[in-house]
Amino acid sequence: MLKGIAPCISPELLKVLAEMGHVDELILADAHFPGHTMNPRVLRADGLGIATLLDGILPLFELDSYADPLVMMAAVEGDQLDPAVEARYLAAVQRHVPQAGPPVRIDRFAFYDRARQAFAVVMTGETAKYGNILLKKGVTPVVSQH
């Protein structure tokens, strides 16, 4: 355990977050997502919900301020989104980034394309349908050292 690091952040996830550069993307994938098919770098966070991970990641992770930093999958024609899923995620995001807007929604296949190019995919225990979210990393502010 480390001070100031949420217990949901595994050592492997902490390493990946530190290795990411600005504009790199991280997929927090629901339990149904084909993460191992999409990306060679897959981390496991089985049993954890995405909102819990957002609460652990966002104190450590600057969201991109130049492009859409939050992206979710749009419903396939004929399906409906559960608005409570996005609301739960956005509540977690806004606890740490109050100015953050709602996620942009993109087509399922466009989301898969982004997942293939992402820095990493974190497979979670999230069971909500269309529960995947992409985080785009921004430039980490420089902390003055006196």
Image: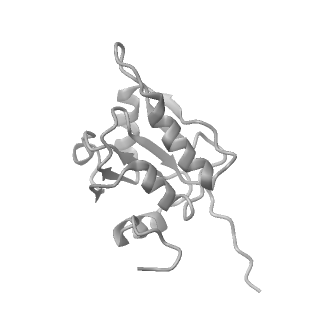
Q: Position of residue 22 (x, y in %)?
A: 56, 56
- Frontmost residue, 68 versus 89: 89
Using residue 55 as the reference point, say whether residue 115 is left or right of it.
left
Residue farthest along the top direction in this orientation: 78
**Image quarter (top left, top right, bottom left or bottom right) of the N terminus:** bottom left
Q: In the image, what residue occupies the spot 29% across and 49% down?
A: 125
Q: In the image, what residue occupies the spot 37% across and 42% down?
A: 115
**Image quarter (top left, top right, bottom left or bottom right) of the C terminus:** bottom right
- Frontmost residue, 142 versus 47: 47
Using residue 27 as the reference point, say whether residue 59 is left or right of it.
right
Residue farthest along the bottom direction in this orientation: 146
**For residue 67, which quarter of the picture?**
top right
**For residue 33, which quarter of the picture?**
top left
In this rendering, the count of numbered labels is 0
72 to 46, vertically: above or below: above
81 to 2, vertically: above or below: above
Q: Position of residue 121 (x, y in %)?
A: 34, 51
**For residue 78, which quarter of the picture?**
top left
Q: Position of residue 7 (x, y in %)?
A: 41, 69
Using residue 35 as the reference point, say whether residue 18 is left or right of it.
right
Render colour scheme: one colour
- Frontmost residue, 88 versus 98: 88
Using residue 68 as the reference point, say whether residue 88 is left or right of it.
left
12 to 71, vertically: above or below: below
Q: In the image, what residue occupies the spot 39% across and 23% down?
A: 75
Q: Position of residue 32 (x, y in %)?
A: 25, 39
